[in-house]
Amino acid sequence: MSSITCPECGTMNTPDSVFCAACGASLATATTAPPPPPPSATTAPPPPTVSPVERPTGVTILGVLAVIAGILQILSGILLAFLFDSGGIVVLFLIIAIFYFITGWGLLNLKKWSWYIALILSIIGLVGFPVGTIISVIVLWYLWKTRNYFGL
């Protein structure tokens, strides 16, 4: 069933109306609105949304700390190169920094391989007695605790 739209106020009126029910304007010159289309059977409902795996806050912290460690490695290498006048130190520290940067990116994106690299870097960090050992033990414990987020 179609309805008549009032040319003055836009109110929809019944087809047998002569005057607008809202404003009283004459509907003699008004046009009949076409009926709304029936719902299509081919319209599919939207697909269900799948929430991605949320990264634990601790893994985010480890990822950010790995990037910061990479920055500190570069700065330390430059400082030691100036103190000892050796370019080889910069190269060594730069290689270590690249590992930290890659690990930080992988941890922030929950890449499986980043868990292994973080594990190796933490094992190497155990030799930094006493502070490095304590931090590395905590990181190793946390990595082991969150390994299922990395698909392990």
Image: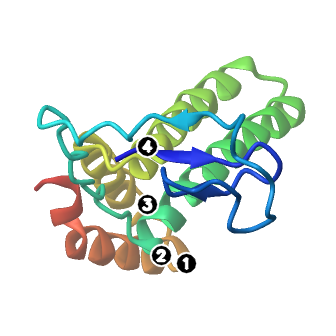
The reply to whether discs 2 and 3 touch (Cβ–Cβ < 8 Å) is: yes
Q: Secondary structure at mark 3?
A: helix
- Residue at x 21% of width, y 53% of height: 48
Q: Amino acid at mark 3?
A: Gly
Q: Are marks 1 and 2 in contact (CB under 8 Å)?
A: yes
Q: Disc 1 or 3, which lies upstream in sequence?
A: 3
43 displayed left or right of 16: left
Q: How many marks?
A: 4
Check residue 135 in the rendering and tell me which mark sits there, or answer none.
Answer: 2
Identity of the amino acid at label 1?
Val
Query: Whole-percent x and y of residue 17?
Result: 57, 56
Give the side of residue 103 with respect to residue 18, left or right. Answer: left
- Tell me the crowding category of disc 4: few under 14, some 14 to 19, or many 20 or more residues within 10 angstroms, Cα based: many
Looking at the picture, how far across and down is residue 101, in whole percent? Answer: 54, 38
Q: Position of residue 89 (x, y in %)?
A: 67, 28
Q: Distance between the Cα atoms at labels 1 and 3?
A: 9 Å
* Residue at numbered disc 3: 125
Which residue in the rendered view is the most extreme toward the right?
Answer: 82
Q: CA distance from mark 4 to mark 3?
A: 14 Å
